[in-house]
Image (cartoon, rainbow, N blue to C red):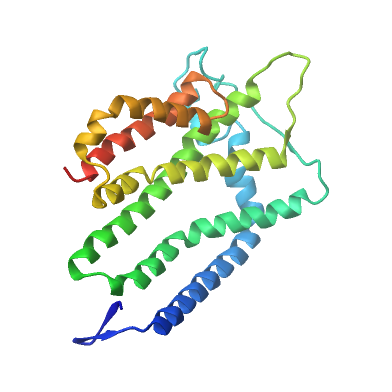
Amino acid sequence: MAKEKEGTGEVEMTFWGHLEELRWTLFRVVAALFVCLIACFCAMPYLFDHVILAPTTSDFFLYRWLASWGGDNPLLPNFSDGTFRVEIININVASQFLTHISTSFWCALLLVFPYLVFEIWRFVQPALFANERKSVAGAFIGGTFMFFLGCAVGYTLVFPFTFRFLTEYRLSSSIVNQISLNSYMGNFLMLIFMMGIVFELPLLAWLLSKMGLVTKEFLRKYRRHAIVVLLLLSAVITPSGDPFTLMVVFLPLYLLYELSIRFVKG
């Protein structure tokens, strides 16, 4: 049985005690998620106009920053075009309402993620030895930070580059791009959350090393193989396929791989 410190002594927690604690943990997480869901639902019109749809106009901060560099590069979209604007259209009667609800849920989940990690830590912490608690707590904190960092990279770099390239690509001048709401939100959420997940690579490497499955020498030995795998993963994450956007995704992943080598045991 897992032991839980209580005062200066230790008491064993029964199976039903664990079940009751799990029930209250789930209740607190669902309650927090529900509160954040209501708040996000109310704020969603503002978030949609100023955050989610921001990459659809030339006023997006990344576009303005790149436009300040000047010059034309055939591999990059024309960021100096101050008239860039993509109209998002809706072709289904219920899409706007359903998108309002689903996007509110994902935003609420993003906001409640640190609290979710805290509740998981509080639930498993009594079952750990004192020397394990510090390293596991560090893993939870580091994993949360890396997830949000990955989401930030997805929003500020990966999605805008991909979206701008795809919307300005022309197979024929006779074809007019009309981006549907479902298509835009599908790519937006996939790229951002996918980057948040892949940024957990150092944590995954650390966990595998704790299990004795990988070592520093193993990761160094298969570095070239990892580069090929990361390139393929970058190609899957970025649907545009252009070399520049591919490198925008690949470079952070490769840096994460190198960082993973520093995290694992020798």
Query: Residue 81's spot in the image, x, y percent?
Result: 59, 22
Name the residue at 31% across, 44% down: 202
Query: Residue 218's spot in the image, x, y percent?
Result: 23, 35
Name the residue at 28% across, 29% down: 222
Query: Residue 173's spot in the image, x, y percent?
Result: 74, 13
Residue 217 can be seen, yes or no: yes
Name the residue at 28% across, 80% down: 4
In the picture, measured across the screen, residue 221 lies left or right of residue 160, that is left
Query: Residue 167's spot in the image, x, y percent?
Result: 65, 26
In the picture, measured across the screen, residue 209 lies left or right of residue 81, that is left
| Front position in the image: 22 or 69 | 22
Residue farthest to the right, as pictured = 93
**Which image quarter is the C terminus in?**
top left
Residue 58 location, quadrant: top right
| Front position in the image: 219 or 78 | 219
Q: Is residue 39 above or below residue 214?
A: below
In the picture, measured across the screen, residue 242 lies left or right of residue 171, that is left
